[in-house]
Image (cartoon, rainbow, N blue to C red):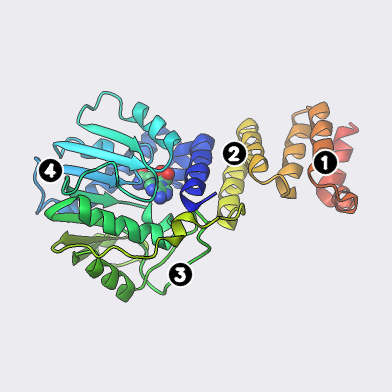
Amino acid sequence: MNIAQKMKREWNQRAQHHAQYWVATENFHDDKEFSKSGEETAQALLSCIQPLADASWTVLEIGCGVGRILKPLCSHFKRLVGIDVSGEMIHQSKNWLKGLNNVETIETSGVDLKSFPDETFNLVYSFVAFQHMPRPVFLRYLEESNRVLKHQGYLLFQIPIGTIRDTAIEDTVTMRQYSTNELADELERCGLESTDHYPVDSELRHHREEVPGRIFHLAKKTGTVLYSNNTDWLESECGETFSLLNTRMYLWFAEQCLQKGQDDEALRTYLALRAQDPRSLEKWIRTVEILVQQGKHEEAQDTLEKLTIAIPIYETLTALLESKNCVRLERMSNG
Ligand SMILES: C[S@@+](CC[C@H](N)C(=O)[O-])C[C@H]1O[C@@H](n2cnc3c(N)ncnc32)[C@H](O)[C@@H]1O
């Protein structure tokens, strides 16, 4: 499996689990809250570009998710296109954007903008998407943005800036951070002239306060792009491992559900996580615990049996059964 396939697979899994959670982790509880967060991001974006923008513009969003930002933007521009590596996000975007006829969403490879000819867009933007991408993927999108932008078109994007931070290429969610110099060099190579930057959040904008991950960078296409010769990363084999952040985010979601009494939703989350990574014990134990709490003792027993097959280390299981959680489980299941 190469990185394009891995990004597609994992973002599809996340979208199937709970698209709105993975798109806006703090504003996913209901459609109203989710929609409001989209309006706020759209306003922030507009306040950076509006003095330069024109209603006749054609606009592209890279990593559009279900269309949270595209929806409030569509009354401001003539035509909008959103692309995403996840076919499931795109599938759900059709519903979220139903009835809006100047916006279109497309599933793409996740590593290029080949669906579009040169000089198609006046504005390309991206929010909380580049930060999750492996470095070479983000840099490839900078190159491709130059190609699909019209002359003097704009690229407006959010990316964390500070001390350089990176992680394994196969990690499709942990945030990467770029240094000011690194970003400046890459923009220059890509024929994009950095013009300004703005805090994303209105409160921070008001005080001109800057939080590294919450800044929009604005760049203008002024020259031609020099594509990187190194494309080995496109074909190199990716490991099957999941990032720690991926697991933590699923677990955090499940714990939130349990606190709200949404046991079935929590169970669904543990099952999703177990399907991805069967050798991780915590998900099995939590699944059993919920099943016991729900009085589904046969299913709990069945799950424990499957666990011994997935993780055939008897000692580990024995140790687990002796742990506090499982003693409690046993007591409960014995009535
Ligand atoms: C946190 S969501 C943000 C969605 C949207 N920008 C928003 O703010 O509502 C990140 C999105 O980027 C997409 N994504 C991740 N890697 C991508 C890639 N290489 N190419 C295109 N989309 C990607 C994911 O599928 C996901 O929909």
Q: Which dot marks residue 274?
A: none
The residue that disc 2 covers is 257
Q: Amino acid at mark 2?
A: Cys
Q: Secondary structure at mark 4?
A: loop
Q: Residues within 10 Å of mark 4 (few under 14, many from 20)?
A: some
The mark nearer the N terminus, 3 or 2, is 3
- Compared across the picture, whether 209 is left or right of 275 comes to left
Tell which residue pokes out farthest to the top in this image: 99
The mark nearer the N terminus, 4 or 3, is 4
Q: Residues within 10 Å of mark 1 (few under 14, many from 20)?
A: few
Is 312 located above or below residue 19 in the figure? below
Picture residue at 66% right of the left edge, 37% below the top: 271
- The C terminus lies in quadrant: top right
The mark nearer the N terminus, 2 or 1, is 2
The mark nearer the N terminus, 2 or 4, is 4
The residue that disc 1 covers is 309
The residue that disc 3 covers is 165
Q: Amino acid at mark 1?
A: Ile
Beta carbon of the mark 1 residue lies under 8 A of ligand 1: no
**Cα gap from disc 1 to disc 3, whole angstroms:** 39 Å
Mark nearest the camera among 1 and 3 is 1
270, 62: nearer the viewer: 62
> Residue 63: where, in percent of width, then height?
36, 46
145, 102: nearer the viewer: 145
Is 149 located above or below residue 296 in the figure? below
> Residue 33: where, in percent of width, then height?
38, 38
Q: Secondary structure at mark 2?
A: helix
The residue that disc 4 covers is 57
**Cα gap from disc 3 to disc 2, whole angstroms:** 32 Å
- Compared across the picture, whether 44 is left or right of 220 comes to right
193, 321: nearer the viewer: 193
